[in-house]
Image (tube, grey):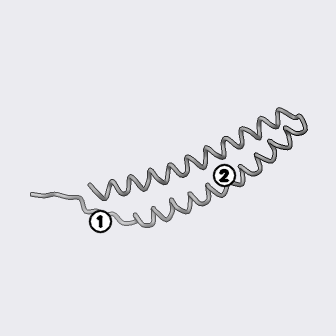
Amino acid sequence: MGVFPDFDGLGGIGDLRAVVGALLTFVLIVAVLMLVVSAIVWAVASAHGNYSTASKGRVGVLVSVGAAALAGAGVAWMNWLINLGQQL
């Protein structure tokens, strides 16, 4: 006797992948724009001796890199879970 789940009964997996891909694109574009602006603020503030603003620019750079990494990891994790669910 073999009992297996019916993955064709669960609709919308393709739509879920499209939504996750679109969100990844949006997050990555915002992260790159934030990285550019924060790097410029960091450089200008450091050159003028404004260390408080320079530290805020540095934090912005780190946050934007972290956001891009988390977005990429989130999509990879979602794809892994979808593929794992199809193999069960």
Element type where label 1 sits in the image: helix
The front one of 86 and 45 is 45
Circle number at residue 77: none
Toward the left, the furthest residue is 1
Query: Which residue lies at the image location 77% right of the left edge and 50% below the top edge?
Result: 37
Q: Which residue is mark 1?
A: 9
Q: Is residue 69 above or below residue 46?
A: below
Amino acid found under the numbered disc labelled 2: Ala
Quadrant position of residue 42: top right
Quadrant position of residue 14: bottom left
Q: Position of residue 86 (x, y in %)?
A: 31, 59
Q: Is residue 31 left or right of residue 72?
A: right
Q: Position of residue 50 (x, y in %)?
A: 87, 35
Q: Is residue 49 left or right of residue 64?
A: right
Q: Quarter holding the N terminus?
A: bottom left
Query: Which residue lies at the image location 81% right of the left edge and 37% below the top edge?
Result: 54
Q: Is residue 40 above or below residue 86?
A: above
Identify the mark nearer the N-term, 2 or 1: 1
Q: Quarter holding the C terminus?
A: bottom left
Q: Is residue 14 left or right of residue 6?
A: right
Q: Is residue 77 left or right of residue 84?
A: right
- Number of marks: 2
Q: Which residue is mark 2?
A: 31
Toward the right, the furthest residue is 48
Query: Which residue lies at the image location 62% right of the left edge and 59% below the top edge?
Result: 26
Residue count near mark 1 (Cα–Cα under 10 Å), binned few <14, some 14–19, many ≥20: few
Amino acid found under the numbered disc labelled 1: Gly
The front one of 29 and 2 is 29
Element type where label 2 sits in the image: helix
